[in-house]
Amino acid sequence: MSIALPKSRKVVALYGDGTFRIKERDLPELESGSILVEVKASLVSPGSELKGPLKPGVKSAGGWRGLREMQLDPDLSLEAKPFGYANAGVIVALGDGVKGFELGERVACIGAGYAQHSDYSVVPQNLVVTLPENVSFEQGAYGMLLTTALQAVRRGTPTIGEYAAVAGLGMVGLLTSRILQLSGCFVMGWDTVDARLELAKDFGIDGTVNVLKEDSTELTREFTNDRGLDLSVIALGGDAEKPAHGLEKCMKISPDGHPMGTMVVVGGAEFPFTRSLTNMDIRRSSRTGPGYHDSEWERGGSYGDVFVRWDTKKNLELCLRLVSEGRIPVEKLTTHRVSFNEIEAKVLKITRDPDSILGMVFEM
């Protein structure tokens, strides 16, 4: 059956004055191995999506605070930037070679440059998974951040009964904390924003610390029964020297006085590698698992279960199963829902108080 496909789409773009505006763009070509999705919900990932456009030679704080900085100190010469990498919707067309999907199927999509904030997205088939029947489009739009968090936990190789701390309780930090709990760890969350710490408690995280108001070293040591942390995660962007060395003080200590254990760094955190860290196992994790950004794999390739048990697609499927079973209540992270047609005015108003925002979902 022939289906008349749209020739253009509406996309949300970030401007140099820190505003979101809707632009009309040509619809990307439906290439072999790709799927056209009519988007029903998309999620803003502030840690990485809101870093630009940037002034030459200037680093943005990133996140909602960074967006507010752009609004207060705009540069209208900067080119508008379409953004987004997590949405969910309904399949309206299938490219050649696509297998395992049907028209009208509800799906979650991920991928920078593909799963954008737009009314239609063209996404490679291995970055698309079927939504479980009881998972909403909004919940499905958390797929990218869920898989990012899951991959960070996999990089940390936790074992049952270990003590872990997560510095930075944005969405990735909270999701990482929850997945660590599901892996059998006791988890403490660190942040500077009281609202996020309260949300962490509501999310079921074992312990929390406001590092600006409380003694994080003493409370974390107490949390671990003075054994020290086995695993720590830095889930924030930008300058992370203070949290990195704060966590270092809380790690388990060898008989000769060296901090030990594993530290996982998610995303763009930066800190100096000092001598005191040299006995710790420091691991970067900034992807969703094997396959992501491998164009051949994304369009239907396979590494084989025998050799790669958990590629990006299988990680995404697992995350949505955990959401379906009620083990990860991602809907608790949504603080703002905005209709697609009201984005320009409503987002500008909401972002005047950046610390009030965690999960912002655009509804189509």
Image (cartoon, rainbow, N blue to C red):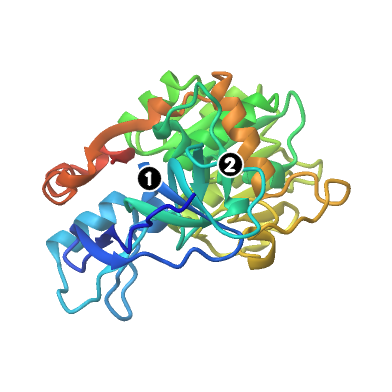
Dot 1 crowding, Cα within 10 Å, few <14, some 14–19, many 20+: many
Going from the N terminus, do you reach mark 1 or mark 2 first?
1
Determine whether 110 is above or below 79 in the image. above
Looking at the image, which residue is at 39% across and 46% down?
38
For the residue pair 25 and 14, the one nearer the viewer reads as 25
The front one of 205 and 139 is 139
Mark 1 — residue? 39
Residue 354 figure quarter: top left
Residue 344, given in percent of the width and then of the height, sits at: 15, 52
Relative placement, left or right, of 26 versus 251 is: left
Q: Secondary structure at mark 1?
A: strand
Residue shown at 55% from the left, 23% from the top: 324
CB atoms of marks 1 and 2 within 8 Å: no
Query: As displayed, is residue 276 above or below residue 132?
Result: below
Q: Is residue 240 left or right of residue 183?
A: left
Q: CA distance from mark 1 to mark 2?
A: 14 Å
- The percent coordinates of residue 280 (x first, y second) are 72, 51
Q: Is residue 194 among the parts visible in the rendering?
A: no
- 70 to 223, vertically: above or below: below
Rendered residue at 37%/55% (across/down): 4
- Give the amino acid type for the residue marked by disc 2 in the picture: Val
Q: Residue at x 36, y 64 (%)?
A: 27
Q: Secondary structure at mark 2?
A: strand
Q: Amino acid at mark 1?
A: Val
Q: Which residue in the protein does label 2 denote?
A: 129
Residue 136 seen anywhere in this rendered image of the structure: yes
The residue positioned farthest toward the right in the image shown: 306
Relative image position of residue 250 (x, y in whole percent) = 61, 38
